[in-house]
Image: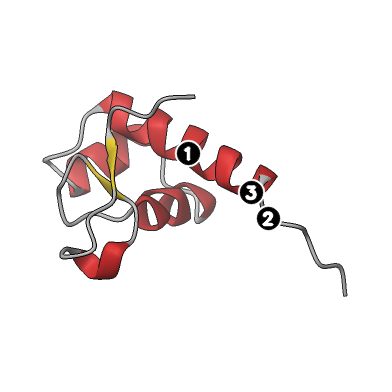
Amino acid sequence: MKFTRITIDPKQMGGVACIRGLRIPVATVVSALAEGMNDAQILTYYQDLEAADVREALLYAAEALQRVPLVYA
């Protein structure tokens, strides 16, 4: 899948995946969802984000997890 809203720049935020070149990491958006925030709350808190950014962050995280072997305790 091609991600149009996810950027990775070694000179920004240590090269972590961010949303559209903003200093908002994908992990921050996914964590907010996991902690119970809904899309509207995230968009209110991070006013530079758009609804499509939240969806693409989830898709990116899902694809990234498919590439990493899971370790069970």
Residue 68: which disc? Answer: 2
| For residue 49, above or below residue 46 | above
How many C-alpha atoms fall within 10 Å of the one at disc 3: few (<14), some, or many (≥20)?
Answer: few
**Residue on which disc 1 sits:** 60
At mark 3, the secondary structure is helix
Q: Where's residue 63, x and y in %?
A: 58, 38
Do the residues under discs 3 and 2 have CB atoms within 8 angstroms? yes
Q: Please name the amino acid that badge 2 sits on.
A: Val
How far apart are the alpha carbons under marks 1 and 3? 9 Å
At mark 1, the secondary structure is helix
Which mark sits nearer the N-terminus, 1 or 3?
Answer: 1
Q: Where's residue 12, x and y in %?
A: 17, 63
- Residue at the extreme right of the image, as rendered: 73
How far apart are the alpha carbons under marks 2 and 1? 13 Å
Q: Where's residue 61, x and y in %?
A: 52, 44
Q: Where's residue 54, x and y in %?
A: 36, 34
Residue 50: which disc? Answer: none
Q: Is residue 27 left or right of residue 69?
A: left
At mark 2, the secondary structure is loop
- Residue occupying the point 50% across, 56% down: 35
**Residue on which disc 3 sits:** 65
- Residue occupying the point 68% across, 55% down: 68
Q: Is residue 36 left or right of residue 14?
A: right
Q: Please name the amino acid that badge 3 sits on.
A: Leu
Q: Which of these two is toward me, 69 or 33?
A: 69
Q: Please name the amino acid that badge 1 sits on.
A: Tyr
Looking at the rendered image, the disc whose residue lies closer to the viewer, 2 or 1, is 2
Question: In terms of image quadrants, where is residue 39?
Answer: top left
How many C-alpha atoms fall within 10 Å of the one at disc 1: few (<14), some, or many (≥20)?
Answer: many
Which mark sits nearer the N-terminus, 2 or 1?
Answer: 1
